[in-house]
Amino acid sequence: MIPVETAEEQEIVNRVFAANQGHVFRFWNELTGESRKRLLDQLNAFDFKQIAELTNRYIGSKTSNPLKRQLEPVRIIPPISAASDRKRFEQIRKLGEKAIMDNNVAALVVAGGQGTRLGFDGPKGMFPAGCVTGKSLFQLFAERINATEKKYNSTIPWYILTSQQNDAETRAFFKDNQYFNLNPAHIRFFRQGVMPGLTPYGKLILDAKDHISVNPDGHGGSLLALRKSGALADCRNRGIKWLFYFQIDNVLVKICDPLFLGYHIQRDAEMSVKVVTKRDPYEKVGVIGVVDGKVKVIEYSDLSVEEMEACNPNGRLKYNGGNIALHIINVDFIESLVSDGVKLPFHKAFKKIPTIDDAGNPVESEDSNGYKFEMFIFDALPAAREVVVMEVLREEEFSPIKNATGFDSPETARQDMSNFYGQWLEQAGYNVPRDQNGNVTINIEISPMLALEADELPARLPANLDLTSDLYLE
Ligand code: UTP
């Protein structure tokens, strides 16, 4: 018997027991009224049918989805980098520019992740990433949005996905920094949903006597959160047709890239994706392919060695397009996806989940002890009527900060940023110092407010640049 005070509370308790999750009340007798309410409120929000389905589908099965599928390569638009090439694509780019000028484009950053690999104390967007200035990721992106608005004399609303854990701190950071000179009326924070962790037996996990362990529901949760928070309706009211989706950790992201937008619009696509060439056949990155007639991201763990190594007659890998999580997504398409709940599948990961011991004290599990469930944004691709897959150069557009050290870390991002802006200066006629590996040997950072693209730079450069020490241009 769990003593409760109201019929509503009793109904929640009944649901919990019917779902065989009664163990969550094991400290009930020790809880105060407020703690009891906290636990019941949390339980009330859970979808026990979904939890049972996840348990049956993902936890019971030993094999991780043995794939019987027809995989074929996808058509990929090759990278366009040289200035001469750019001229040929001017018309397509103009389509994208027009969409920005017409105020039909918004930016969407997913910043609700836990950033456990980086281990930074605070929302990842607050991480100091400017290689000379130490500007935060949020500031770097804000300035790119600001510069794009100025260039096209338009407004680009910015939707920022946060989580339960980092929402308040993220909002406070923007406020304390005067929204990085953006108009706060065009910035909207919205929180993603959560999913409970489950033991290998499908049981909920207490992480306090009055609280169940939950995690953000994955970047795919952004779609449902857009609708639930009213952000999707806000897009509609503002006349936004296309969302430029990016992740919080990529220091080289070209926000609202007009060429990417242009292709997307020209081909009347519903969702598009940028890819980079894989570093080698075995790189641990999802690749884009056509599976049973639908464009999909195939996770590296779902590719056979034969598929990883398969080559075209020209010697290039057949499945070469590594997903870098940059998308354009139509507002209409999102609406159609979320109108009756999201149909994205869940992915499970066996992780260390915070828990408590028999006395209710927090314990750090030494090994993984339970499953986390997340939705991934790229699972929306197969539902799109048309998808543009566009290859870009890694050194120009992709350098994520994921790990504390080693690859995809602050150190590689710093080098990639210096190499990137170093190349701009070289194009402007300067001799930039590089080592024998081709890496620029000073830190170089250029504010997007000075130049958004390389060809804007020469006319705006000050005279007599000193390239013997770190350089910041604004
Ligand atoms: P990652 O896969 O890098 O996950 O997210 P993470 O949680 O940030 O980091 P780790 O794995 O714990 O080290 C890719 C992008 O998706 C966002 C992240 O903020 C990042 O921009 N994301 C991820 C969300 O917004 N919500 C989530 O639930 C998960």
Image: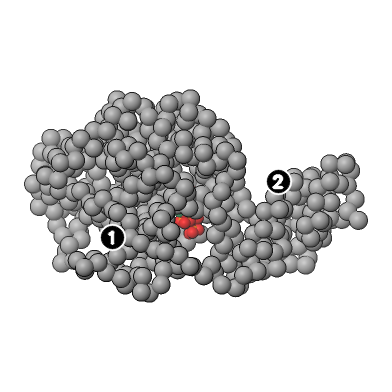
User: Which residue occupies 88% across, 53% down?
Assistant: 2
> Position of 15 compared to 142: left or right?
right
Q: In which quarter of the image is residue 362?
A: bottom right
Q: Which of marks 2 and 1 is in front?
A: 1
Residue 236 in the image: x percent, y percent? 48, 28
Residue 473 in the image: x percent, y percent? 22, 41
Residue 288 in the image: x percent, y percent? 37, 57
Crowd class of label 1 (few under 14; some 14 to 19; many from 20; radius 10 Å): some
Which of the image's four quarters has the C terminus?
top left
Query: Which residue position holds label 2?
Result: 45
Q: Give 416 or 48, whichever is nearer the viewer.
A: 48
Query: Which residue position holds label 1?
Result: 277
**What is the basis of the colouring in this image?**
one colour
| Type of amino acid at the residue the image marks with label 2 | Ala
Which of the image's four quarters has the N terminus?
bottom right
User: Which residue occupies 42% across, 38% down?
Assistant: 330
Residue 391 in the image: x percent, y percent? 28, 52
Report the label total: 2
Q: Give 206 or 238, whichever is nearer the viewer.
A: 238
User: Can I make out residue 95 in this image?
Assistant: yes
Q: Do the residues labelled 2 and 1 touch (CB within 8 Å)?
A: no
Q: In this view, does 105 lie above or below 116?
A: above
